[in-house]
């Protein structure tokens, strides 16, 4: 009887250790099933962001577009995160808005995503570059840098997230 109790106690400890190990490791997995270490990006420098911007500057806007002949806002963000950080982002603004951690507007840093609710069910996204500005694929002007102080963007600002 004493030997059985000790065996049961040891077995309980093993089960608890295994359960803790699997529970804690699950917390370190992101939306794509990668470990948090793989997902974490190094902080962007303005030089990296501006080099990316210069390579896309003036590219026309095209809904559903993903390339140099025309690109939409979420594809521009997707391309930016792949080229600058080697991070695969979801394709749509809706899906991108669900990735990362929300950041206070006053705490934003270059490389953060800025989101806008521009209509009943319309969303827009860009990449913050610093100095209260963000780069994005504008429907009217193509890939440009805009100020978050612009009354239009102030009116429709939704949130900032950090990947």
Image (cartoon, rainbow, N blue to C red):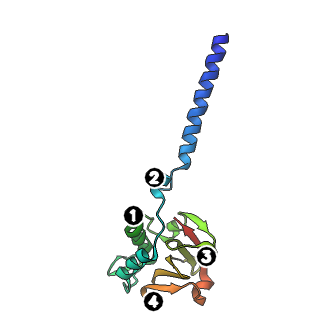
The front one of 109 and 69 is 109
- The residue at 40%/83% (across/down) is 61
In front: label 4 or label 2? 2
- The residue at 50%/56% (across/down) is 31
Could you give the CA–CA distance between mark 4 and mark 2, rounded to whole angstroms? 37 Å
Could you give the CA–CA distance between mark 4 and mark 3, rounded to whole angstroms? 20 Å
Residue position marked by numbered label 2 in the rendering: 34
Q: Residues within 10 Å of mark 3 (few under 14, many from 20)?
A: some
Q: Earlier in the sequence, mark 3 or mark 1?
A: 1
In front: label 1 or label 2? 1
In front: label 3 or label 2? 2
Residue position marked by numbered label 4 in the rendering: 140
Could you give the CA–CA distance between mark 1 and mark 2, rounded to whole angstroms? 13 Å
Q: Quadrant of residue 10?
A: top right
The front one of 38 and 121 is 38
Residue position marked by numbered label 3 in the rendering: 158
Q: Earlier in the sequence, mark 1 or mark 4?
A: 1
Q: Position of residue 151 (x, y in %)?
A: 60, 89
Q: Earlier in the sequence, mark 3 or mark 2?
A: 2
Q: Secondary structure at mark 1?
A: loop
In the image, is residue 2 above or below residue 53?
A: above
Residue position marked by numbered label 1 in the rendering: 86
Could you give the CA–CA distance between mark 3 and mark 2, rounded to whole angstroms? 28 Å
Kindly give the residue lying farthest to the top in the view shown. 1
Q: Is residue 61 left or right of residue 118?
A: left
Q: Secondary structure at mark 2?
A: loop
């Amino acid at each position: 009887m004493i030997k059985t109790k000790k065996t049961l106690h040891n077995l309980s400890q093993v089960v608890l250790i295994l359960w803790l190990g699997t529970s804690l490791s699950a917390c370190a997995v992101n939306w794509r099933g990668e470990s948090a270490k793989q997902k974490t990006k190094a902080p962007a420098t303005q030089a990296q962001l501006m080099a990316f911007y210069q390579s896309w500057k003036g590219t026309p806007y095209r809904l559903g577009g993903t390339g140099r002949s025309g690109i939409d806002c979420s594809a521009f963000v997707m391309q930016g995160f792949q080229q600058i950080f080697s991070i695969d982002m979801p394709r749509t603004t809706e899906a991108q808005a669900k990735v990362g951690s929300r950041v206070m507007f006053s705490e934003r840093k270059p490389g953060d995503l800025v989101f806008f609710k521009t209509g009943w069910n319309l969303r827009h996204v860009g990449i913050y570059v610093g100095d209260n500005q963000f780069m994005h694929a504008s429907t009217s002007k193509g890939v440009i840098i805009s100020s978050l102080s612009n009354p239009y963007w102030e009116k429709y600002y939704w949130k900032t997230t950090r990947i």
